[in-house]
Amino acid sequence: MKTIDLTGNHYGRLTAIKKVGKRPNGNALWQCQCTCGQSCVVDAYNLKTGVTRSCGCLRRAQSKENCAKNEAFRNHIGNTASLGIVDGTNVLAMTKRRQTNRSGVIGVSYEKGRDVWVARLYVKGHLVLNSIFKERSDAIKARKQAEEQYLKPVLASLERQ
């Protein structure tokens, strides 16, 4: 099949410069120059169909514009309280059970491959509990003890605020 020469053609913010190779599926790869000055390699099919229209600068510009327009978003910027973060700890993740949780306890999961129960707890970005147990009840007990030790002070500081 004959390759179509895209040299000099404009696709959104991109200008095709030269063909630089082929993808495993047979699509040509083109070196392109973006209007922002960046250079990138793009699949010819994505260029021609409009899937790829820039080096990524278009998405950044649109995101910036959308954030500026959205008042609710602007009100949440820098407001960690709305995210449930207290002293660098995500309290919501530690106190609200996810719908996908199958163990019934936050921070306790079952690893089918190893046939073990795992208890985990992150506080201030650090893994303070990561233990493996044969019995579910032991994992739950370890998680509850870790919550008492590490999470209780964080929740107490939240109540004082």
Image (cartoon, helix red, strand yellow):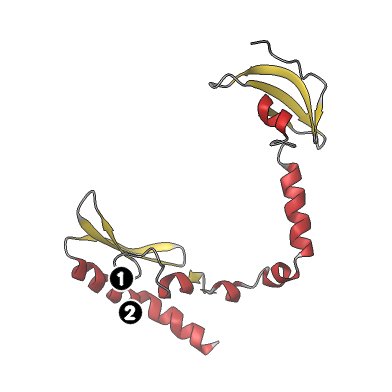
Residue denoted by label 2: 148
Residue denoted by label 1: 104
Q: Residue at x 40, y 67 (%)?
A: 99
Q: Position of residue 19 (x, y in %)?
A: 70, 17
Q: Which is more foreground, mark 2 or mark 1?
A: 1
Quarter residue 72 falls in: bottom right
Q: Residue at x 49, y 84 (%)?
A: 157
Quarter residue 119 falls in: bottom left
Q: Considering the numbered disc 2 on the image, is that residue within a helix, a strand or a loop?
A: helix
- Give the left or right position of residue 78, taking residue 131 as reference: right
Q: Position of residue 43 (x, y in %)?
A: 65, 27
- Going by the numbered disc 2, the residue's amino acid type is Glu
Q: Is residue 24 above or below residue 94?
A: above
- Give the left or right position of residue 31, taking residue 148 as reference: right
Where the C terminus falls, by quadrant?
Answer: bottom right
Instruction: Look at the image and tell me whether residue 29 can be seen.
Output: yes
Q: Is residue 157 above or below residue 72?
A: below
